Each structure stands twice: as structure tokens, then as C-alpha cells.
Image (spheres, grey):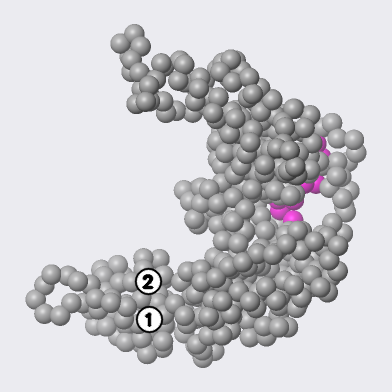
């Protein structure tokens, strides 16, 4: 059955808007070429979208031809403003962007453990209001929030958890009350990080992958056939509760101590580093990110030294030996681990630490691989980013020995910022879905 004229127009309008969102400003001729629509049809939709205040002329094409240059059309970016929040146990980060996702202002603030629920909520809401003002936005159309913990798939609300601050749940309600015109939604932080890696990060070429979040706590997000999987209760990826060998006790329904969390959470990583002899600069508080970054840096430097000795490389990075030329490039796997201590004795504790950490991470990764066979695992979060290729290569090597399922282990390119980026992407998608759909409530300028 052919579509009615109004339905066809709506489809064409949405197609043009999506192209403008993905490709950036375009001329009518470029829209015609990309959509395959006729010139009169494109002219009509450009007129409609301009009248609706969704697109506007942003310049001229500058083409060398007779007559005036073609007009270039772009989405009216300030048609709506969006906010993204990354709420953690220790604080909150906020970013405000326009309809095309350009960040206009951002800020973060710590919230101490001893801060009461009411003051913590007020501090977070005040930060949001300040960033909105700095962005020059009168109001917010959509707010996307990333938070640790389970999201109820039926209500979309953050579920109560004894392991998380109460102000997390109260903040969502407070934002909805203080921003009554905004659409406020909350999603698990690791899920948002995975969406960001899929759209803008290291998993852009993967339809199926798992993100292992390594930060203050642990978590996992599962993307299968291009879709994020949340599970029946919203708990897909709660890998912190995974029972692991050698733990003193089993995890419980309210406490993940004794599970994978006990091996890979930040406190466990710092303790492991101390046992392996990783020293911390005097006066500095040891952190998982700090010790992992320091260890990876030492090993990376030692490997470069080994390559230099093996190749006799000079400033050019290449050398001839026995008539063969060898590049300084390549992976750490090409260097024998036994050669690293010779080149840099300081790297011995760092190597021991990264090996031990990879052993721990492989326990969780191997379990995920055995069940899902994702083909790709991304080490995400601040700790995953700090470990870099030195940690990822070690985990991949262990997985290759533990399972017959081929699995590539990659390092995040977004790190801890992935949560805020994912929240912003979902907020933008939601706003565009509403604003780009004909027949919705009248558009209003924010």
C-alpha cells in the first residue's frame, strides 16, 4: 500500500534531517544526490523545514559556476539545548550542548562521603544550573544521566542500592522538579560508555562487543548485533557479582565483595600494586589510575630500550643488521619478557604488577567470552585507559590460552569521559527523535 502524501513528506523530512545531522551542512543539490529525491521534492522539504525552524541557511557553497552560489543549509543548533550528567560515588560532571551535540559548557564538582543527602543533591543541581547559564541556554529540552547501579527496565528509574549514595536516586527526582519542561532519563553508566565507544570510540567497527568498565568499581556492558542488551531486570553486565576462584567468601545479593569486584575494583588494584612493589611518589595518595599508568609507562619505556638494543637503532628508529632493516614499530609481544629486566631493572615490579592484574582481569573476561563469544572486549574506564596496550595485550594473551574463541582485547579511546559522552549522545538522540518527528507538540526555542 503506497504511503499517503503526508506520510511521504514526513519520511523525506526525517531523512533530510538525519543526513544534515550526520554529514553537517549541505546544499539542496547535495541533499538531492544523497536522498535520491527529485529536485522539486527537495525544494519543498527545504522550505518546510526552514518554516518549521529546524534548518536555516548557514552559508554558500562557493562552487565555481555561473550565477549565484548555492545556499548551504544546516540544523538550527540552538533550537534545543541538552544536558548530560555523569554521577559517581565521589562527585558529578555536567555538560550542556546544542541540538547537534556541540558542547557549550561543562564542569565537575566533588561530593564528599560525609555530605548529607540533601546538601549533595542541592550541590549537584546547582552545578547543573550554573553550567546551563554558562552555556547561554534559557531552558533544557532533554537531560541524560549516567549513574552506577541498576536501572529498572519497566520504570526507567534508578533502583535502590545499599552500596550507592542515596543522593543518586534523589538527584533524578530533584532535576525533574527543578527542570519541569525537560525530559529527564537515567541509564547505567557502563551502558552509556559502551554506546559512546560504539559511536565515537574504539568499537566503531564492531556490531558485537563487550565493554569491561574498570574504575572505582567494575561493570560490563553488552552490545549484540548493534543493540545494547539490558536483561530482564536491567542487570546485564553486573560483573562485580561474578563469583571468582580464591575469594574468601561468595558475593551476596547486596554486596559484591567476594566477587570479581574484589579482584578488579580500584581498592583491589592499589593493594595488588603495593604487593608487587610499585612505589608511589612521596606525599601522593595511591590511586588505581596512578599506579596502572605508572606501571604501563615503565614497561613501555623498557620495551623501547630493548628494541633499541636489539636493532642498534639510532635517531631514525631503524637499523640494518645482517643486511636486514627492522622498524622500531610493532607491538610489545615482539619483545621477549626476559629482555625487559635487563634493559630496565625498575620495570621488574611494573611487569610483575601488570602480569598479575591481567591474570585477574582474564578471569572475568574469560567468563564473558565463554557465554557470549563477543569477539571483542574493550577495557574501559579510567583504569582501562591508563593500562593502555600494555595491559590489553596481556589480557588478550591470557584469553587466547584460556578459550578457543578468538577474542580481540582493545583499549578505550574515551576513558572516563565515555559516560558523559554516552549520556550526551542519548540525550541528543531523544531530542532529535521528538523534534524531527512531524505532528509532535509545537516546537519552542530554548
- Residue 138 placement: quadrant: bottom right
Rendering coords of residue 57 (x, y %) = 31, 81
- Residue 324 placement: quadrant: top left
Establish if 207 lies above or below 42. Answer: above
Magenta segment, prevailing SS (helix, strand or loop)? loop
Q: Which quarter of the rendered picture does the N terminus lie within?
A: bottom left
- Residue range (magenta): 234-244
Residue located at (65% from left, 64% from top):
108
Establish if 224 lies above or below 345. Answer: below
Name of the residue lying farthest toward the front: 283
Work out whether residue 207 can be spotted. Answer: no
Left/right placement of residue 207 relative to residue 118 reads: left
* Label 1 residue SS: strand
Residue located at (38% from left, 81% from top):
55
Name of the residue lying farthest toward the right: 249
Residue located at (63% from left, 86% from top):
181
Q: Which mark is residue 172?
A: none
Left/right placement of residue 17 relative to residue 34 reads: right
- Residue toward you, 433 or 423: 423
The crowd level at tag 1 (other Cα within 10 Å; few <14, some 14-19, many 20+) is: many
Rendering coords of residue 120 (x, y %) = 79, 70
Which numbered disc, 2 or 1, marks the residue that appears first in the sequence? Answer: 2
- Tell me the residue that label 2 is attached to: 20
Rendering coords of residue 14 (x, y %) = 42, 76
- Tell me the residue that label 1 is attached to: 55
Rendering coords of residue 332 (x, y %) = 52, 26
* Label 2 residue SS: helix
Residue located at (59% from left, 56% from top):
417
- Residue 44 placement: quadrant: bottom left
Establish if 304 lies above or below 204. Answer: above
Q: Are marks 2 and 1 in contact (CB under 8 Å)?
A: yes
The crowd level at tag 2 (other Cα within 10 Å; few <14, some 14-19, many 20+) is: some
Amino acid at each position: 500500500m503506497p504511503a499517503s502524501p503526508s506520510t511521504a513528506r514526513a519520511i523525506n523530512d526525517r531523512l533530510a534531517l538525519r543526513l544534515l545531522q550526520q554529514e553537517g551542512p549541505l546544499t539542496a543539490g547535495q541533499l538531492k544526490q544523497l536522498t535520491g529525491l527529485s529536485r522539486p521534492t527537495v525544494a519543498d522539504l527545504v522550505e518546510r523545514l526552514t518554516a518549521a525552524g529546524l534548518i536555516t541557511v548557514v552559508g554558500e557553497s562557493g562552487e565555481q559556476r555561473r550565477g549565484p552560489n548555492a545556499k548551504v543549509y544546516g540544523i538550527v543548533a540552538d533550537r534545543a539545548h541538552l544536558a548530560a550528567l555523569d554521577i559517581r560515588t565521589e562527585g558529578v560532571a555536567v555538560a550542556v550542548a546544542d541540538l547537534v551535540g556541540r558542547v557549550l559548557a561543562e564542569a565537575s564538582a566533588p561530593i564528599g562521603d560525609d555530605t548529607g543527602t540533601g546538601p549533595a543533591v542541592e550541590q549537584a543541581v546547582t552545578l547543573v544550573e550554573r553550567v546551563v547559564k554558562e552555556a547561554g541556554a534559557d531552558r533544557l529540552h532533554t537531560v541524560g544521566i549516567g549513574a552506577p547501579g541498576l536501572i529498572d527496565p519497566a520504570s526507567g528509574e534508578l533502583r535502590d542500592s545499599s552500596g550507592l549514595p542515596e543522593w543518586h536516586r534523589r538527584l533524578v527526582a530533584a532535576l525533574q522538579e527543578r527542570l519541569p519542561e525537560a525530559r529527564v532519563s537515567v541509564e547505567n553508566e557502563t551502558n552509556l560508555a559502551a554506546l559512546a565507544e560504539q559511536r565515537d570510540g574504539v568499537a566503531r567497527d564492531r556490531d558485537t562487543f563487550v565493554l569491561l568498565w574498570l574504575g572505582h568499581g567494575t561493570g560490563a556492558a553488552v552490545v549484540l548485533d548493534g543493540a545494547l542488551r539490558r536483561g530482564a531486570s536491567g542487570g546485564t553486565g553486573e560483573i562485580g557479582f561474578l563469583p571468582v576462584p580464591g575469594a574468601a567468601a561468595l558475593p551476596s545479593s547486596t554486596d559484591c565483595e567476594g566477587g570479581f569486584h574484589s579482584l578488579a575494583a580500584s581498592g583491589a588494584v592499589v593493594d595488588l600494586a603495593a604487593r608487587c612493589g610499585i612505589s608511589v611518589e612521596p606525599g601522593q595518595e595511591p590511586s588505581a589510575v596512578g599506579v596502572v599508568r605508572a606501571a604501563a609507562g615503565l614497561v613501555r619505556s623498557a620495551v623501547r630500550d630493548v628494541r633499541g638494543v636489539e636493532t642498534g637503532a639510532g635517531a631514525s628508529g631503524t637499523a640494518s643488521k645482517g643486511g636486514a632493516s627492522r622498524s622500531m614499530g610493532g607491538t610489545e609481544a615482539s619483545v621477549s619478557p626476559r629482555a625487559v629486566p635487563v634493559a630496565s631493572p625498575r620495570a621488574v615490579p611494573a611487569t610483575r604488577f601488570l602480569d598479575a592484574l591481567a591474570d585477574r582481569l582474564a578471569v572475568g573476561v574469560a567468563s564473558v567470552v565463554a557465554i557470549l563469544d563477543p569477539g571483542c572486549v574493550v577495557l574501559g574506564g579510567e583504569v582501562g585507559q591508563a593500562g593502555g596496550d600494555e595491559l590489553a595485550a596481556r589480557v588478550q594473551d591470557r584469553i587466547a590460552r584460556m578459550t578457543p574463541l578468538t577474542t580481540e582485547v582493545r583499549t578505550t579511546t574515551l576513558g572516563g569521559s565515555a559516560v558523559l559522552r554516552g549520556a550526551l549522545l542519548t540525550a541528543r538522540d531523544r531530542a532529535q527523535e521528538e523534534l524531527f518527528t512531524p505532528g509532535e507538540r509545537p516546537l519552542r526555542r530554548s
